[in-house]
Image: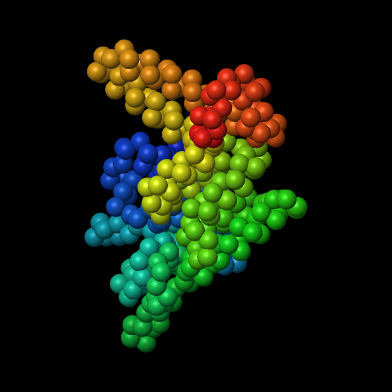
Amino acid sequence: MGSKDYLTNDEVPLFSEVLLSGEEDSSSRSHLPIEDRVMKEVSQFFGQELMPRLGVKEKVVGVAPTETVHLEMKNQLADFMFEMEDKSWRHLEFESDRVNREDLVRFRASEALTSHIYGVDVVTSVVCTAETETPVKELHTGINTYQIHYIHMKDFDADERLRRAEVLQGTAGLERADLVEILLTPLMAGESEIKERIRRTLRILRKEWERLGEEDYRRMSSILYALATKFLKEDDLNEMKEEFGMTILGQMLYDDGRKAGLEEGKVEGRAEGKAEGKAEGAEMNLIRNICSLMETMKLSAEQAMEALQVPKAEWGKYSKLL
């Protein structure tokens, strides 16, 4: 199985899209913390770019099975298994709490069983988003010592990575791995507020839209939205929704909301609800057109509204929505 199998898997829904649609079930692992699920999604679609930035030197060449069934019919589930260039497998786990002894017992069992069944060497890398700096990295049992490769997201400086990305974008250009890295800045350490990190990352992504393509752009912006719902207070989240409204994710959010609103209007049989839905649709379409002109033609908001023949009396209203 090649790396393209997990980088372009259209059949797997974004958990953030499931989150927004309200259709989560047990298969989506809804019990997991959002930061864990964000890391899973980043790994699933951008694993090749993520691993080197986490300090894994070996090159990813494909994905490996994450489920192992042994004779007692108990499933051993791993977050991710990557096949590496040296033929070993890298077991990638995500923890939002402090890594403890029980975790290492579980990781060791998974490694041993996987190695026995598939005949491969397995190394476990644990990506931790917790604040604590006292993890358990070694397990001593009898004469044996088991170790994990521990990666603490708080060891990374979010502000440094964002500054670097902004400089590169204006000079040499950004690689896909640079964009994957800044997606995770809300989970890193830094002096800036998380809201500001999300805003800066979104603005960097918008400038890369054509090069990324719609699929990757949508995935990346949805990952940021999921982190925003986790870490931002209600007022800050409402403010950031204006930023997200200028992305493809904003279109997705709008379409979902409009569809739900129209369905509700039909059920209740209210003609005014349908009329309101049409009016809101026209307004949002105009906002998207204004944003598109501002982005593609480098116009100011006023110039874009003038080009679209928006009445000057309404400029103030639309300026607040941009």
Above or below for 166 versus 135? above
Residue 144: image location, x then y, percent:
39, 83
Residue 193: image location, x then y, percent:
49, 58
In depth, the one of 31 and 164 nearer the eye is 164
Residue 110: image location, x then y, percent:
37, 65
Which residue is at 36% across, 83% downward? 140
Describe residue 51's horizontal placement relative to residue 15 as left or right.
Answer: right
Which residue is at 34% across, 26% downward? 260
Residue 10: image location, x then y, percent:
49, 37
Which residue is at 24% across, 18% downward? 268
Q: Is residue 155 visible?
A: yes
Q: Quadrant of residue 12?
A: top left
Describe residue 162's horizontal placement relative to residue 83 as left or right.
Answer: right
Describe residue 306's horizontal placement relative to residue 220 as left or right.
Answer: right
Locate the C terminus and report the quarter of the image it occupies.
Answer: top right
Q: Total of numbered circles in the picture? A: 0
Q: Is residue 5 visible?
A: no
In depth, the one of 172 and 307 nearer the eye is 307
Residue lying at the far bottom in this picture: please name it.
143
Residue lying at the far top in this picture: please name it.
271
Residue lying at the far front in this picture: please name it.
313
Q: Quadrant of residue 164?
A: bottom right
Looking at the picture, the colour scheme in use is rainbow
Which residue is at 55% across, 33% downward? 319
Q: Quadrant of residue 266?
A: top left
Above or below for 70 versus 236? below
